[in-house]
Amino acid sequence: MKRVKLNKKWNIINEKGTYLSEFWFDFASEFRGDLAYVKRSNKYNFIKKDGTYLSKIWFDYVWCFRDDFAIVELNTK
């Protein structure tokens, strides 16, 4: 998996050379294990290598996983 940036937007290309998502993001992190975090319209989520999101909820902020846990912020909580 490789991140790509085009016109100030980010996406991820898989091993087959296809985009992981139909959406372009404000930011996409490198994968750590099976997940990367993405930012879109000032909200964050985690994306899996198959292109699905970890959560239906988009968070105000996320911190990367550590020991299989991630800290997320939603509505300043």
Image (cartoon, rainbow, N blue to C red):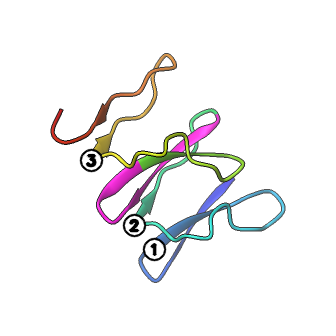
Q: Is residue 65 left or right of residue 16?
A: left
Q: Amino acid at mark 3?
A: Asp
Discs 1, 2 touching: Cβ within 8 Å: yes
Return the residue at label 3: 60
Discs 1, 3 touching: Cβ within 8 Å: no
Please tell me whether mark 1 or mark 3 is closer to you in this view.
3
Q: Residue at x 72, y 49 (%)?
A: 50
Question: Where residue 40 appears, x then y in whole percent?
Answer: 39, 63
The tag earlier along the polypeptide, 3 or 2, is 2
Circle 1 SS class: strand
Return the residue at label 1: 9
Q: Is residue 26 above or below residue 52?
A: below
Q: Is residue 1 left or right of residue 42?
A: right
Q: Quadrant of residue 75?
A: top left
Q: Is residue 44 left or right of residue 65?
A: left
Circle 2 SS class: loop
Return the residue at label 2: 26
CA gap between label 1 and label 2 equals 5 Å
Discs 3, 2 touching: Cβ within 8 Å: no
Question: Where residue 8 appears, x then y in whole percent?
Answer: 41, 77
Q: Is residue 42 magenta?
A: yes
Query: Residue lying furthest left in this view?
Result: 76
Query: Residue lying furthest bottom in this view?
Result: 7
Q: Amino acid at mark 2?
A: Asp
Question: Where residue 27 appears, x then y in whole percent?
Answer: 42, 61
Who is closer to the viewer here, 64 or 76?
A: 76
Q: Residue at x 26, y 47 (%)?
A: 60
Q: Which residues are magenta?
A: 34-44
Q: Residue at x 39, y 67 (%)?
A: 26
Badge 1: how crowded within 10 Å, few (<14), some, or many (20+)? Answer: some
What secondary structure is the magenta-colored segment mainly? strand
The tag earlier along the polypeptide, 1 or 3, is 1
